[in-house]
Amino acid sequence: MQKFEITGGIPLAGSVRVSGAKNSALKLMAASLLTTEKTILYNVPLIQDVYTMADVLRAIGASVIISPGRVEIDPSGDLSYTTPYELVRRMRASITVMGPLLARQGRARVAMPGGCNIGPRKLDFHFSGFEKLGARINVEHGFINVAANRLTGDVISLDYPSVGATENLVMAACLAEGRTVIESAAREPELIDLVKFLTSMGARISGAGTDTIVIDGVDELGGATHTVMPDRIEAGTYMLAAAVTGGELEIDGADPRHLEIFISKMRAIGVGVDEYEGGIRCRGGDDYRGTDIATLPYPGFPTDLQAPMTVLLSLARVHSIVTENVFENRFSFVDELNRLGADIRTSGHHAVVHGNCRLEGAIVEAPDLRAGAALVLAGLAASGVTEVRRIGHIDRGYENFEQKLQLVGADIRRVEAGEPAPSPTPFN
Ligand code: EPZ
């Protein structure tokens, strides 16, 4: 059990290098199961979720070697098709092995993910898509069983552009017989990164980045080497760190094309944002306008930046309205933020953020990954000392979070919260 202690009020200055994207790296690791050859991934962030995905692959029978920035996966031996409950419970993204296992092994048995801090997250689009490809599905004793002799391509029209369902179905369709067309597909940059990787393994896919993806099945895929795209959510988090502290940061490696709506909202609020070759420069101020935001699937405003953005909006001169359209329970941080002095009222999927607040240090608890990062940002902006507890959530998705912040001047320390810390995960 560890916590962050933050003494706020220091404008951050300098440059931060963005890591590889968590939400791409995890899927690329799952996709490595589609071949019997070795794959090598570079720019993989060393975060808890990556270690968990490595454990998932090992439980299935693949060898995974993790070294700084590099993951080597060898799935050549006999694979099992089962993913244990303990791992799926730790990380919901474990379910993305379903598509690759179904395609390669003809079956997958994956523990049903339980509740989730950001709301109920159903799997119906994954299931109906697999059924369209000819798979049989049943759920018993808390496990999802998916099986098919050989998947066969079909037209799958998603009711909603689910990121996870699109990824699972694209991976499964790579080895299906014939053509699969996925309509209303997700358009997230991480999905494009996955498709680039699959293509370098020999898959035949077109349309990634549009709402219709076409996959022509092949008999087998080979090993590949790939560099994970930069983490746009991490980049946005550091841009907000500059803004809420009135500082100036260069976010090296950030790709502005992945953050267009977010950047336009930052500018509307009064944050200076410029692009330079290889990154984004972000300059905070001390007089911010409010603006309304509504989260939507890409290219809309990203739900993963909603909580950190709400911290900035609470510092604006006037009120703003935040609408969360993607997940049902992504305002769980609001009570914690109000403990720091914000004035935010929620009603259903809307939050009214009364601006003009002066944040003051207090003890708060991180309810989930992005909300945890938001509370750290609030602590950096607040006067006095803020203690953020339950930071295990933050370690799931931000590589070297406090070290990166310390390098640009933040006063943030990781301290034991009374109980012994878990032993660090080894590099293999
Ligand atoms: C991915 O989750 C990301 N996770 C999330 O990031 C991100 O917030 C989300 O996409 C949206 O961008 C990973 O990539 C590991 P969805 P995913 O399927 O794939 C509903 C973070 O903090 N839905 O697009 O689970 C679902 O309940 C995380 O890094 C169904 O109803 O997102 C949700 O309300 C959190 N049925 C909405 O769609 C389904 O079958 C979006 O889910 C599937 C989804």
Image (cartoon, rainbow, N blue to C red):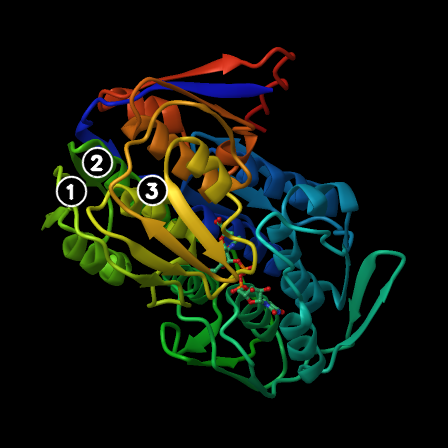
Location of the N terminus (image quadrant): top right
Front residue (pair 333, 299)? 333
Q: Residues within 10 Å of mark 3 (few under 14, many from 20)?
A: many
Query: Could you say where residue 262 lies in the image, as x and y percent from the top left?
Result: 26, 57
Q: Residues within 10 Å of mark 1 (few under 14, many from 20)?
A: many
Q: Amino acid at mark 3?
A: Val
Q: Is residue 390 left or right of residue 7?
A: right
Residue 428 picture quarter? top right
Residue that label 3 marks = 311
- Quick one: SS at disc 3? helix
Query: Could you say where residue 179 lies in the image, as x and y percent from the top left?
Result: 55, 86
Mark 3 or mark 1, earlier in chain: 1
- Quick one: SS at disc 1? strand
Mark 3 or mark 2, earlier in chain: 2
Q: Amino acid at mark 2?
A: Ala
Q: Which quadrant of the picture is home to ligand 1?
A: bottom right
Residue that label 1 marks = 282
Above or below, 409 relative to 44: above
Query: Could you say where residue 120 lies in the image, as x and y percent from the top left?
Result: 65, 59
Answer yes or no: do the residues labelled 1 and 2 have beta carbons within 8 Å? yes
Residue name at image x 37 percent, y 33 percent: 341
Q: Amino acid at mark 1?
A: Cys
Q: Is residue 293 left or right of residue 133?
A: left
Residue that label 2 marks = 242
- Quick one: SS at disc 2? helix
Residue name at image x 55 percent, y 39 percent: 367
